[in-house]
Amino acid sequence: MTRIIDFYFLALKVAIALLLAAMIVLVFGNVILRYAFNQGITTSEELSRVFFVWLTFLGAVVAMREHGHLGVDSLLKRLPPRSARIAVLLGQGLMLIATWLMISGSWTQTLINLPAGMPATGISMGWFYGAGLAFGIPTFLIILWDMFQVATGRIDLATAQLVRDSEEEIAHPDAAATASGATKA
C-alpha cells in the first residue's frame, strides 16, 4: 500500500512539472508570437490559467503530505503532551471541516459547470472546478491519517514537525534545523 501511495505522489510531482513546463511554453510562445509576428495563440491564456490552478492545487496536496505548509507550533511545544494532542486533534478536525466544505463546493461547482464551455477553448468549465476535488479528496484522507496517528500516539508531538516555521525550513530542512539548534543552544 505504501508503494502505491508513494507512486501516486510521484505521479503528482510529475504532473506538476509537466503543467509548469506547459505553462512556460504557452506563455513564452505567446509573448514571442505577439512581439515578433503581432499574433498570438488565443487559447494560450486560458490554458495557462487552468494549468496554473491545477498546479497550485496539486502542489498543495504534495505539501500537505510532506507537512510543508507554513504554520506556528510554538504553543504546542509548550503544552503538556495530553493538551497538545487535544489541540492538534481539534485543529485537524477544523481542517477536516474546511476540506469537506472545499470538496462539497467543488463538487457542486463542477456539476453546475460541466455543460458550460470556456470561451476560447470550449473545454468544459468542470475541469477548472474539478481541481478543488483533486485537492480536497487526498487532503481529507491525509488529515484523517494524521489524526489517526496523533490519536493512537504513533506521532510523538514533542518531536514531530507537523508544520514549518519558516520558508527556509522548506527550502533547506537540514540547514534550518542546524541554525535553529544553534540559536537554542
Image (cartoon, helix red, strand yellow):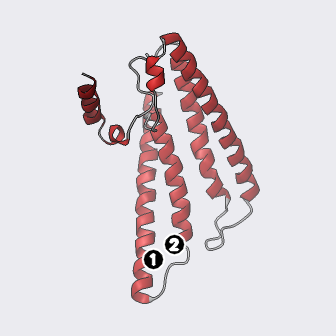
158 vs 13, nearest the viewer: 158
Q: Amino acid at mark 2?
A: Ser
Using the image, determine if residue 86 lies above or below residue 30.
above
Residue drawn at point x = 49 percent, y = 53 percent: 55
Which disc, if any, is residue 44?
A: 2
Q: In the rendered image, is residue 8 in sight?
A: no
- The residue that label 1 is drawn on is 30
What is the three-letter code of the residue carrying label 1? Asn
Q: Residues within 10 Å of mark 1 (few under 14, many from 20)?
A: many
Residue 134 makes an appearance in the image: yes
Q: Position of residue 98 (x, y in %)?
A: 65, 37
Q: Residue at x 44, y 45 (%)?
A: 11
In the figure, 132 relative to 22: above or below? above
Residue 95, quarter of the rendered image:
top right
The reply to whether dot 1 and dot 2 touch (C-beta < 8 Å) is yes
User: In screen coordinates, is 120 left or right of 6?
Assistant: right
